[in-house]
Amino acid sequence: MTDAATKLREYAGTFEAALPAYLPGGSLPVEQAMRYAMEAGGKRIRPALVLAFCELFGGDVEKAMPLAAAIEMVHCYSLIHDDLPCMDDDDFRRGKSSCHKQFGEAFALLAGDALLTQAFWVANNVDGAVTILAQLAGIYGMIEGQQLDLLWENKIVYLSDLIFMNQKKTGALFCAACRLGCLAAGFHNHDDHDPERDAAEEYTGALSVLLQLTDDILDVTGNQETLGKTTGKDQASGKSTWVSLLGLESAQAEAQYYAEQARKAIAPYAGEGHFLYELPEWLVSRRH
């Protein structure tokens, strides 16, 4: 049986060993800021999903590594921008000063822009990868979710709205990760009813809601030392969350529900003991 936390660390270690090859090595402020954001650690869930789906469907993990780097670059650029004063205005990320606190707002902004551009450059050698990134990181994907997150501050939203936002803000990149992993394994021409792709996307859809659920719970129950970021900001900024809409106990029950939905989706291809099957329960029980 695979322990999800152990396997996630293995994927993270493999990814981080390969990462310097995809980053600039210069000493200019923007180059330093790019490396600062990318090398700050984190759970590395998105690159792990790329590698895991590639493995699941018989691909070579080494060939998937540029795509894992690209997806994490998009994620890290979004975090840099998310922390800026014009967005969430957060001073801490992954236990360290956020990028704009370390390098100033202008260089942090440029570093985010550069990481997004670098992602497309790195992914460009894999046919179809840039299209996936552009579709799911853009205005009808992650950016749409970020936009809704801002528009709905200090407003009461329905639970269905919150789920939709979660599936865009977090789920779009999760979906991109699974598609890129499948792409690296040789799935170049998906049929509209391809069962493997459908299962992978259903899995990552449930997993993305689960991640946001557990983030909302930890924003209430966690602390800055453990999480590496400021807690209580959702309530302070007037954002509707799973906890504010349902209460803590019901939000925890919903987390279990989405974990089970994710397991059901992937079970025909990655059953009990596989990293992808065990990952949802790890998310439910995580403390950071």
Image (cartoon, rainbow, N blue to C red):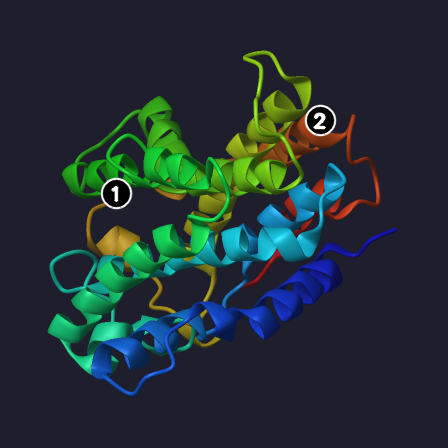
Q: Residue at x 41, y 42 (%)?
A: 170
Residue 215 in view, yes or no? yes
Image height check: is 151 above or below 77?
above
Q: Nearer the viewer, residue 249 or 153?
A: 153
Q: As shown in the figure, which amino acid type bears the numbered disc 2?
A: Lys
Q: Determine which of the numbered discs, if any, sits on residue 5 in the image.
A: none
Quarter of the view holding residue 273? top right
Q: Which residue is mark 1?
A: 146
Residue 135 spot, x, y in % from top left:
34, 33
Q: As shown in the figure, which amino acid type bears the numbered disc 1?
A: Gln
Mark 2 / mark 1, whichever is N-terminal: 1
Quarter of the view holding residue 171? top left
Which residue is outermost to the bottom?
27
Q: Nearer the viewer, residue 59 or 88?
A: 59
Q: Determine which of the numbered discs, if any, sits on residue 264 in the image.
A: 2
Residue 223 spot, x, y in % from top left:
44, 69
Which residue is outermost to the top?
193
Residue 5 spot, x, y in % from top left:
70, 60
Asked which secondary structure carries label 1, the reply is helix
Q: Nearer the viewer, residue 118 or 264?
A: 118
Q: CA distance from mark 2 to mark 1?
A: 29 Å
Residue 48 in view, yes or no? no
Asked which secondary structure carries label 2, the reply is helix
Q: Would you say 269 lies left or right of 50 here?
A: right
Q: Residue at x 17, y 56 (%)?
A: 87
Q: Residue at x 52, y 56 (%)?
A: 66
